[in-house]
Image (spheres, rainbow, N blue to C red):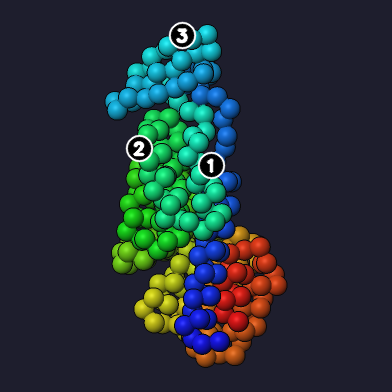
Amino acid sequence: MNANKRQSISRKRIIRAHSRSFAVVFLSAVSVHAAPFVINSAGTQINGAAIQSAADGTVLLTTLNGQTLTFRPGTYRQAFADKPKEMFQVEAMAKDGDLAGATAILRRVKEQYKFLGWDQRASLMLARVELAQKNFPAAVSEYEELFATQPQFKKIPAERANYMEALLGAGRIKETAALVDEDIASGSREAAARAQVVRGDMKAASGQYEEALLDYLRTVLLFKDQTAVLPEATYKTAVALKKLNDPRAAEYFQKVIKEFPDSEFAEMAKGEK
């Protein structure tokens, strides 16, 4: 098989792996509401048959008996529309590997469902899918907008790590390094494990593969309890070994395939064989 054909197959595997990964996180992050509702300032949930919002944040809820209730900003805690039909399209596109198509629809949902819950869901999905497509500045922008409106996401280690990867890809090295140091010193083992992988990525990006290898290996060996991080750390260990022409690379690629068969990194490891 010639080099161009191998590269094409490898790229298809990577796209398929990222698409499958995005589809999984998409489905896990989205809860389905059977009907629109508003939670008023007193904490009471009012269900309805239809809902719409205005640019200033005013929400109009049509109740089950046909009455229209107006909720102005400050008079409600949360408003949520029923699941938009567009989100079913996004799910299908993600599974089929059409991340660009999913991105376009998510941007429409984000705009059309402002103040109705799905704008924030779409923002989270956009940040992830832009990162999967290596559109790093766009991913950074989405994450920063998301963190501004939903600061709780900046405390989630996986989302922080995604944000760091986006910053690194966008060339914002100092900011990435500051977040890495912060998370390694945080006391959270998950945050430290993910940050250490990002630190390895920083070194790999500058061609320091031996130093990157040490960070990846430390994660594999010292954070065995962080099972969500191990597939990535193991795969990147193999990649670093390959860059260094170390024959152990094949062993680690096989380790990814064998121990983490359902991960996106197993799919990518197959492309290295």
Looking at the image, is mark 2 or mark 1 earlier in the sequence?
A: 1
Earlier residue among tags 2 and 3: 3
* Residue depth check, mark 2 versus mark 1: number of the one nearer the observer: 1
For mark 2, what is the residue? 111
Residue occupied by mark 3: 67
Label 2, secondary structure: give it: helix
Circle 3 SS class: loop
Q: Residues under labels 2 and 1: Cα distance?
A: 17 Å
Q: Nearer the viewer, residue 172 or 196?
A: 172
Q: Amino acid at mark 1?
A: Phe
The reply to whether callout 2 and callout 1 are in contact (CB within 8 Å) is: no
- Say whether residue 145 is left or right of residue 268: left
Q: Quadrant of the C terminus?
A: bottom right
The Cα–Cα distance between marks 2 and 3, rounded to whole angstroms, is 26 Å
Q: Residue at left 44%, top 22%?
A: 51
Q: Identify which residue is drawn at 39% across, 76% down.
A: 205
Label 1, label 3: how many angstroms apart (C-alpha)? 29 Å
Q: Who is closer to the viewer here, 73 or 272?
A: 272
Badge 2 crowding class, 10 Å Cα cut-off, few under 14, some 14 to 19, many 20 or more, is: some
- The residue indicated by pointer 1 is 88
Camera-side residue: 8 or 76? Answer: 8
Residue under the image location 42 percent in, 12 percent down? 69
**Residue 12 point in image, percent of width and height:** 52, 69
**Going by the image, does 270 lie left or right of 102?**
right
Evaluate whether residue 217 shows in this view: no
